[in-house]
Image (spheres, rainbow, N blue to C red):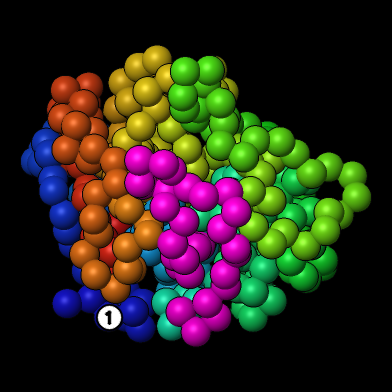
Amino acid sequence: MNTPNDPTPPIRRRGLLIGTGATALAATAAVGGIAAAQEDDTQPEAPAVRLRWLGTNAWEFTTANATVLIDPWVSRFPTGAYTEEGADPETEIEVHEDVIDEHLPKADTILVTHGHWDHIADVPYLATRTGATVLGTETHLNLLRAMDAPEAQLSQVLGGELYQFDGYTVEVFRSSHSASGEHKRILFGGTRPGEVPKRPKKIKDLVEGGSLTFMLDFGGVSFFNAGSANFHEHEIAHLRPTAVFVQPGGGHTPGYVERLLEATGFPPYVIATHWDDFDKPLTEPAVPGGDVEALRERVAAASPDSEFLLIDHLESHDF
């Protein structure tokens, strides 16, 4: 069993795996990943990266020297998001500091893909407690300022940036949120540019505010994460990540899964994300909110040599 304090964990695959074997390992080697380091003793060993899922699109990346978080939301106050009526826009925002302290003990960098409550609501408290650098759009940062996030830690990005951190790089890409309904509307769309708004009190106040995708590279092991089921294909066509995060949905995004995997070179690993009903407890096994089995089948058909990882709440996978 993995322990969070072990800085050099063994490689372990956990979850549902598709396309294991020599083909997947060769693909990993082609992008300079773990397999290449194992087969060539002349190359330095790639740093171990432990990936842990905290529900929704909340992911923790841990190495011996750093912790990076994407969309770290663990308060999981109920909104009715996966009921027939959908999320109640009048739901009061709650920040459960005890839950955040329990599950997110540290952070060096926090990456925000967009401004909806299930991605951003816990970030101000977490940034204040950890001193982490936070990357987001102008709207994301204005919402965070309105919730008392430390100004000195906020870094505004647009897409196109490439930043060097201690032991890893972060590359930022413009993205788009997926749409729903007959008229292809984005839930709680809009922006908050310019002046800092009043403190958000309800989930409708946390608007999407532009979406971002992040490429996180730990020196041979790289991860491509979008917070929603849409992307800008021509901006990412040159990328060859070790792992791509894919979520159910994207019904209004033509060929969402197939085009994403082709654009990123049919990655060695495909990781399911944002598939749970996040009104349910984080401390219990994930209850599907999206059709993850259909997603698994689409990935298998589009990229049969990729391993499909379905990681449960608070479980980890080591690269």
Whether residue 139 appears in this view of the structure is: yes
Work out whether 244 lies above or below 168: above
Specify the farthest residue to the top: 254
Specify the farthest residue to the right: 195
232 or 143, nearer to the observer: 143
Q: Which residue shows up at 58% across the image and 49% down it?
A: 89
Q: Relative to residue 64, is residue 30 drawn left or right?
A: left
User: At which x and y percent is residue 56?
Assistant: 40, 54
232 or 292, nearer to the observer: 292
Three-letter code for the amino acid on which mark 1 is drawn: Thr
Q: Work out which quarter of the rendered image holds the C terminus and state it.
A: bottom left
User: At which x and y percent is residue 285?
Assistant: 21, 64
**Which stretch is magenta?**
72-99
Q: Work out which quarter of the rendered image holds the N terminus and state it.
A: bottom left
296 or 319, nearer to the observer: 296
Q: Relative to residue 230, is residue 250 drawn left or right?
A: left
